[in-house]
């Protein structure tokens, strides 16, 4: 395996936690993602659905997990179905999981081949009063394709129209938002790889390099260190591209005097990291760039301190907005009177800082988390304020990943990734 897997104990614990929140006599089903076709016989690389991974550690296509705590036979309480492997598959695609390996990874004792699924599901459905279906209810989700899960749900509803249904997603949002110590270590592994990539590019960035060359340096360092690759499409934005929040073209040549904003994170064992650093292409900030950088950095540091258990993300965003407003006034970007008369629903700072400050991070970059519930300990969140000034041709964002504590401010998991401007200049000039 490219990555060091988490223990099967963690996956057993995750399943037990899920089952504890199920109503009796429910049968829960979780499907893998499809392998998406491009055209002809080519496909996109496989990416496992994070929910089945969270509950089993199985990182293979065409897998199905059933959780049925009230099954008549104890061996049917947890069942994993995996794609049948044989000599021919081994020759063409490489070894797929054996049933024994699947048990070792997941801790699930009952493992069948996928072609046994329909018959057994139909038997178990007769014992169950309702199904837990795993629909995607992430508040940012926008899915236009029919997933494997959707196809299964359609099939199951047609086959058993009288079974009522419950939502797994609600339970998973709750569970996945709180991280186990093993998960935090895996996120830290991803962060360590990201740090290596960032340190590598610091000495590589110079006037004349292309944004995609920097992307290639990150990719090299990530893959060399057993990462799955980028946790999300990297943003390598120089000059005015810094002001395009989701810039992913990465195809401009970097000029002296420009800043370069890099929103890049490695994934490790399906866990994401999410970092942004903004550095001067020439190795030296102009005094205006430095003033804005210092302002963003001050906001970031204060925002981190605010992430304590009990706070509501909505209140936190309001507070960060106020701190940002003061900085924007100091920078001469906002006018005090205009701020006094601003519409609280549309605060003036949004002109220069138009995105949120924090999101949950974990198996997904924008991970599960109940946005209207107070924060708890052991949540991993990003902190990523920015100031974007198209009229001055640059924008700055700084983003760290932190883990909330039982008491007091969170631990910054990216503490060792340089972000102090003097240190950045020093490291760049060394290269
Ligand atoms: N890289 C995506 C984000 O920062 O939210
Ligand atoms: Mn980011
Ligand atoms: Mn982020």
Image (cartoon, rainbow, N blue to C red):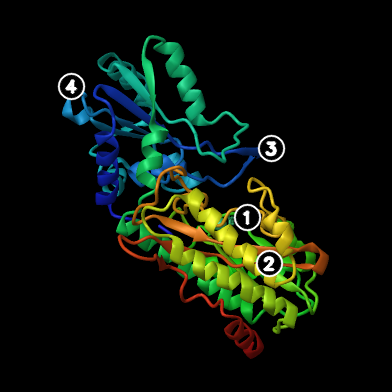
Identify the element where label 3 is drawn.
Answer: strand
- The residue labelled by disc 1 is 233
Q: CA distance from mark 1 to mark 4?
A: 46 Å
Identify the element where label 1 is drawn.
Answer: loop
The reply to whether the C-beta atoms of the residues labelled 1 and 2 are less than 8 Å apart is no
The quarter of the rendered structure image containing the C terminus is bottom right
Q: Is residue 282 above or below residue 360?
A: below
- The residue labelled by disc 2 is 328
Whichever of labels 1 and 2 marks the residue nearer the N terminus, that label is: 1
Ligand 1 is within 8 Å of the C-beta of the residue at disc 1: no
Residue count near mark 3 (Cα–Cα under 10 Å), binned few <14, some 14–19, many ≥20: few
Q: Is residue 158 left or right of residue 197?
A: left
Identify the element where label 4 is drawn.
Answer: loop
Q: Nearer the viewer, mark 4 or mark 3?
A: 4
Relative to the observer, which residue lies in front, 405 or 271? 405
Identify the element where label 2 is drawn.
Answer: helix
Percent of width and height locating residue 282 = 74, 82
The quarter of the rendered structure image containing the N terminus is bottom left
The reply to whether the C-beta atoms of the residues labelled 4 and 3 are less than 8 Å apart is no
Q: From this viewpoint, which residue is outermost toward the bottom?
A: 430
For residue 132, what is the image quadrant?
Answer: top left
- The residue labelled by disc 4 is 72
Percent of width and height locating residue 237 = 72, 64
Q: CA distance from mark 4 to mark 2?
A: 64 Å
- The residue labelled by disc 3 is 39
Q: CA distance from mark 4 to mark 3?
A: 45 Å
């Amino acid at each position: 395996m490219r990555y060091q897997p988490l223990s099967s104990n963690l996956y057993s614990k995750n399943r037990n936690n899920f089952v504890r929140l199920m109503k009796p006599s429910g049968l829960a089903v979780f499907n893998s993602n499809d392998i998406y076709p491009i055209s002809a016989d080519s496909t996109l690389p496989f990416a496992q659905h994070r929910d089945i991974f969270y509950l089993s550690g199985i990182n293979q296509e065409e897998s199905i997990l059933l959780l049925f705590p009230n099954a008549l036979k104890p061996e049917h309480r947890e069942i994993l179905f995996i794609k049948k492997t044989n000599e021919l598959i081994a020759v063409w695609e490489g070894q797929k999981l054996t049933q024994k390996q699947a048990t070792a990874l997941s801790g699930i004792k009952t493992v069948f081949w996928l072609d046994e699924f329909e018959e057994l599901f139909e038997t178990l459905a007769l014992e169950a009063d309702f199904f837990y279906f795993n629909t995607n209810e992430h508040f940012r989700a926008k899915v236009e394709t029919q997933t494997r899960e959707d196809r299964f749900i359609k099939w199951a509803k047609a086959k058993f129209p009288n079974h009522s249904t419950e939502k797994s997603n609600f339970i998973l949002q709750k569970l996945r938002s709180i991280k186990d110590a093993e998960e935090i270590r895996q996120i830290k592994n991803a962060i360590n790889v990201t740090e290596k990539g960032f340190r590598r590019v610091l000495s590589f960035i110079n006037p004349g390099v292309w944004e995609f060359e920097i992307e290639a340096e990150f990719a090299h360092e990530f893959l060399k260190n057993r990462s799955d690759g980028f946790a999300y499409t990297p943003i390598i934005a120089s000059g005015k591209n810094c002001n395009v929040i989701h810039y992913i073209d990465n195809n401009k040549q970097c000029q002296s005097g420009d800043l370069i904003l890099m929103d890049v994170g490695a994934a490790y064992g399906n866990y994401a990291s999410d970092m942004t650093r903004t550095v001067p292409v020439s190795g030296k900030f102009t005094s205006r760039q430095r003033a804005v950088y210092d302002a963003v950095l001050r906001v970031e540091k204060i925002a981190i301190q605010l992430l304590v258990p009990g706070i509501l993300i909505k209140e936190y965003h309001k507070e960060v907005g106020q701190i940002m407003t003061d900085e924007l006034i100091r920078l001469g970007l906002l006018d005090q009177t205009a701020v006094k008369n601003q519409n609280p629903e549309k605060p003036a700072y949004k002109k220069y800082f138009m995105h949120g400050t924090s999101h949950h991070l974990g198996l997904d970059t924008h991970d599960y988390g109940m946005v209207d519930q107070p924060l708890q300990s052991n949540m991993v969140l990003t902190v990523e304020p920015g100031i974007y000034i198209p009229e001055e041709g640059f924008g700055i964002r700084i983003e760290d990943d932190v883990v909330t504590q039982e008491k007091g401010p969170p631990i910054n998991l990216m503490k060792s990734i340089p972000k102090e401007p003097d240190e950045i200049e020093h490291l760049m000039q060394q290269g």
